[in-house]
Structures are given as C-alpha cells and as structure tokens.
Amino acid sequence: MAQVQRMSRLMVKTLRDDPADAETLNHKLLVRAGYVRRTAAGIWTWLPLGKKVYENVARIVREEMDAIGGQEVLLPALLPKEPYEASGRYEEYGDLLFRLKDRKGSDYVLGPTHEEIFTQVVKDQCSSYKDLPVILYQIQTKYRDEARPRAGVLRGREFQMKDSYSFDTSDEGLAEAYALHRGAYQRIFERLGLDYRIVSAVSGAMGGSASEEFLAPAPAGEDTFVDCPECDYAANTEAVTFALKPVSVEGHPAAEELDTPDTPTIETLAEHLGVPASATLKNLLVKVDGEIVAVGVPGDREVDLGKLAEHLAPAEVELVTAEDFEGRDDLVRGYVGPQGLGKVRYLADPRVAPGTSWITGANKPDTHARNVVCGRDFEVDDYLDVVVVEAGDPCPLCGAGLKLGRAIEIGHIFQLGRKYADTFQLDVLGQNGKPVRVTMGSYGIGVSRAVAALVEQTADEQGLCWSKEVAPADVHVVAAGKAVQTELALDVAAQLGAAGVRVLVDDRAGVSPGVKFTDAELIGVPQILVAGRRSAEGVLELKNRRTGEREELSVAEAIARLSA
Ligand code: ATP
Ligand code: MG
C-alpha cells in the first residue's frame, strides 16, 4: 500500500512566472512548482513535495552508507567553539563561520562540518584497536555564511549534508575506507540519476593525501573542470598538469639583444616585433614569504595566482609593488629576463622546458633579447603547473585537446590522515599494547545540493523532470474535470496505491484541464496518467514526462504497466 496524495488536499501553490530574484534553474523551478520557499538569503523551507524529494535523496544516501557498514549518528549543530579553536578552524573559517554567544556569554558556532566533534566522539567511545575500524555518518544541517548564497538550494547558508568519517589504525585501513566510500558514492549518484565525473581535487605535484571530488556537469555550476573528449581523464582545473618535455639545447643561434623602446608589456612587445605572444617569455615577479621570486610562463598564458599560492603553501605569496624595486638595480621593471637574474629564484611552467627558445626581457630598460634558450642561457630552479588551463590544452593522459566545462560539486572524499587525531590526541591501544595514533577520512555529499543538481541537469522548458527513485510520486493521475473523469481518476489512483505505486492525483475541482496539464509537467513526476476524453469507456492516456511519448491504455493495462 503506497500513498495516494490528492492534490485537492496538498499544500502546493504553483506559479506561472519565475521569482524575480531567481538566477538559476533550480531556484526558478523549485519555487514555481511549489517545492521550496525562500525564507531568507540562502535559507530555505522545504514544502511537502520538496520534502518528499529531499527524503528520497536522503534515503538513497542512507541505504548506500549502511551498505558499506556506516553507522548513522546525529550530532548537534550548535557547538562549543573550543574544539574548533583547537584545530585552528575557528580562525581559518573567517567570515564563513556563524558564531554566537549563549546567555552566559560563552562562545558557540553553528557547525560548518564536524571533523573535530567526530574525533572527540571516537576518542570517548573507542579505546582499543578492536573498536576500529569504524565509519560514522550523519545527515544533518550545516551552517556556512557563504558570501554569495544566490543559486537557490545549490548554495545555502543553511543546508543539508551527509558527512561521514572513517577511523582506522593503519594507512591501508584508511585506503580501504576511502575505496568503500568511493564505491558507495558511485552507486548513490547513479541511483539519483545524476551525470557525474570523479576528479582529483589536488594536483599530483602537491603529493599529500588522496582527495577526489564528484562533479555534476551543469552550466549553473561554480566549479570549472576539464574533460577529455578522447579518454576517461577529467580533473579540476587546478589539478591539471602539463608534461615537461625537454629537447636538445643545441642548434639555436646565439642570444642577442634587441632595441625595443616602450614595450613593457607582452602585447606591446609582440606587436613591435611582429611575433605571436606565445614566442615570448613572460616573467612575473612575486614575493614568497617576503623574498622576490620570478615565475616564467609563455607570453600568451595567464598565471593562476591561486594555483601558485597552493604550490608554495604554507609560504605567503604576494604581488610585488613599486616599492619592492627600490634598491634592486638587478630588477628592471617590464624588462626582466631569466638569463640575468642572478640569485633570484626562477620558477617556470613546464612549457618553458630545457631546449625551448624565447624572446624575453634583457634586464635593461627598453631592451629585450631573442634566442634565449632554457638550459643554455638560463636555468629553471623549479617547475610548477601555474598557468590558467585553457580549452584545447593537451590531456595529460592521451594528449587530445581538453574541453572546459562548468560543474556542481556534489561530493568530496578525502583521506585526512592524522591531522585531527593529532590535535585531539586520538590514540587507541594497539595489538602490541602500545598506543596507536588513529588515521581519518572525511567524506561529504550535499544532500540538498544534490536535489538542485538534479534539477539543473534534468529539467526542461516545461518544468521539473525527476528520475524514478527521487520523484515525489511514481505517477501523476490527472482528472480532466468532469465527474466521470474524476471518478475514474480516483478509482485508478486507489488501485495503483493498493499495488504499491506512489500516486499524486489531481482531483481539484474548478481547475481547468489546461492548468492541470501544465502543473503536471511543472511538478515533473515521471509518468502522467490522464483520465480525459475516453473516461466513460474506461480508457486513459499515459504520458512519459521525459520523452513525451503517449499511449492509450485500459484501466487494467495502466495498473499492470505502472505497478510492474
Ligand atoms: P564549495 O566549494 O561548493 O563551497 P566545499 O568544498 O566547501 O564546497 P565541502 O566542505 O567539501 O564543500 O562539503 C561537502 C559537500 O557539501 C560538498 O561537496 C557540497 O556538495 C556540499 N556543500 C558545501 N557547501 C554547500 C552549500 N553552501 N550549500 C549546499 N551544499 C553545500
Ligand atoms: Mg564551500
């Protein structure tokens, strides 16, 4: 027996027009179809239809987390600040963290994620290696004071996340917990009906621990990623690497200086010499922990300062200012070249490989040099992938031209290691009777965001278009309006319900058939069954919401088909 929900008794107010402030499809359609209501910026109310979809997503997540041995818990969202102070995140989170005081003046936070608290739970509950491994998860409300909470339920300030945490005594155990999560996430997103890619979240160069993101390609997404049209490769743009391909330094003409008045930028230089910007070498000066460092990239490429900072972390990276040139006769602003840099550290993109020849600054005002060869006229101290990735850049695996796309981050899996265990001294007694430091993984899925991602990927001009497991009902029965039609609709709905099919039946009186059909398309239940013209003969019309295919069926046929 499944639920038969009568529209006449359902709190749903559909709208013909998009809300004025809506920029994304999920915001427009979830509001128009009566699934959610905006309470404040980035803060949403789930209305009856929306709650059903949300719960379906949560159920799928639960089932797959339970299947890998996860144990569900529920931690508070209102948390003391001390654990976050201990980990350093009370400061690090900055404005993202909601901070508040109780009546006694003690400080609290609204949890943005729960690594600290889970570590404390396990420290309290587990004391021996026999208590591990353990995977704990919760589906819970998180709070982050996002700077731009403008994309509907895609980016909330209050939102729902499934967060899980694995605790192991060995690196192998952590790798296993990570692999279990990876598999569970694949099954979850498949069942949700999301198109997704798994991308590595940090660049290989950083070494460190494994971390992957699950991205759902969609124009509304706030992440850019690269996708190889020829092979399986997909990556966060930050993680794309370019292979260093050294060639022989022999055979190049000797370097020579060129008189290039008033050419302090790549554009002015390339125009003056009549060469493409790609023939020139751009040398960006930055300060790394206060020391001036030069970064060389082809003249037609941009340096991604975020990537650079990430590579050099924890060192602080800043741009140089005019003052930094004072007393530095070795640095001629606008005319820097790596061949005359002396002790200044020179970092470069792998495109500046040994054997490549460049036009670059000659370290004299108004002067450049050509035939400046890497490995002959200058050396690179360190190679770093720091250029902004562009469409057409070669795939690191197969060399095909990469495509750039936008995507929504729907999940993240992360081998944290011992960071939090160190902070909270989480040890258990090992097999040999000595304490062992525990190693941790943390894994998130945006449950509310997954609802938004589904809308962004599947909705069409008419409205929402849910996948089977997520839809608020299996079939939307529409009674066109006359008594005989309503009678048939309610009868079929009851029989379907008895057969275990979840039914939404539009039995509203005084609503025109046109409005009912439009609403059915907007609400997006996968099958629409209409009791219309041929109701007196007991014939119904079944319409597939996604394909638009229609066919006429008898009551018995409709029930057999839909309950199959
Ligand atoms: P983003 O880069 O989009 O801000 P994040 O890297 O901060 O995400 P995590 O801290 O890894 O995200 O959180 C785990 C998951 O929670 C994310 O993969 C995403 O699906 C979801 N999530 C994060 N922030 C929000 C938000 N403001 N609203 C809805 N879901 C979110
Ligand atoms: Mg974030």
Image (cartoon, helix red, strand yellow):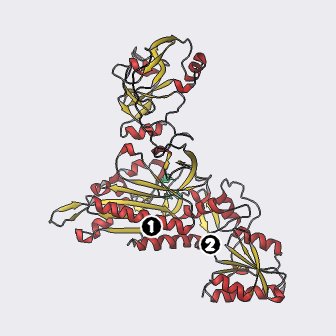
Q: Is residue 82 visible?
A: no
Instruction: Tell me which amino acid carries mark 2.
Output: Ala
Determine the residue positioned at 49% across, 53% down: 232
Report crowding for label 2: few under 14, some 14 to 19, many 20 or more residues within 10 A (C-alpha).
many
Quarter of the image with the C terminus is bottom right
The first of marks 1 and 2 along the sequence is 1
Classify the position of the N terminus by image quarter.
bottom right
From this view, report whether residue 432 is shown above or below residue 349: below
- Front-most of 393 and 182? 393
Toward the top, the furthest residue is: 259
Q: Is residue 89 visible?
A: yes
Residue 309: percent from the left, percent from the top? Answer: 42, 38
Residue 195 falls in image quadrant: bottom right
Neighbourhood count class around disc 1 (C-alpha, 10 Å): few under 14, some 14–19, many 20 upward: some
Q: Nearer the viewer, mark 1 or mark 2?
A: 1
Q: Which mark is residue 184?
A: 1
Q: Quadrant of residue 382?
A: top left
Q: Amino acid at mark 1?
A: Ala
Q: How many marks?
A: 2
User: Label 1, label 2: how many angstroms apart (C-alpha)?
Assistant: 21 Å
* Mark 2, residue position: 471
Q: Is residue 471 left or right of residue 302?
A: right
Residue in the image at 74% along x and 64% along y: 462
| Residue 329 falls in image quadrant | top left
Mark 1 vs ligand 1: CB under 8 Å? Answer: no
Residue extending farthest to the front is 251
Query: Which residue is at the far left?
Result: 433
- Mark 1 lies on a secondary structure that is helix
Which one is nearer the viewer's eye here, 170 or 558?
Answer: 558
Residue at x 69%, y 54% (from the top left corner): 21
Residue 25 in the image: state x and y as whole percent: 66, 58
Residue closest to the eye, 288 or 170: 170
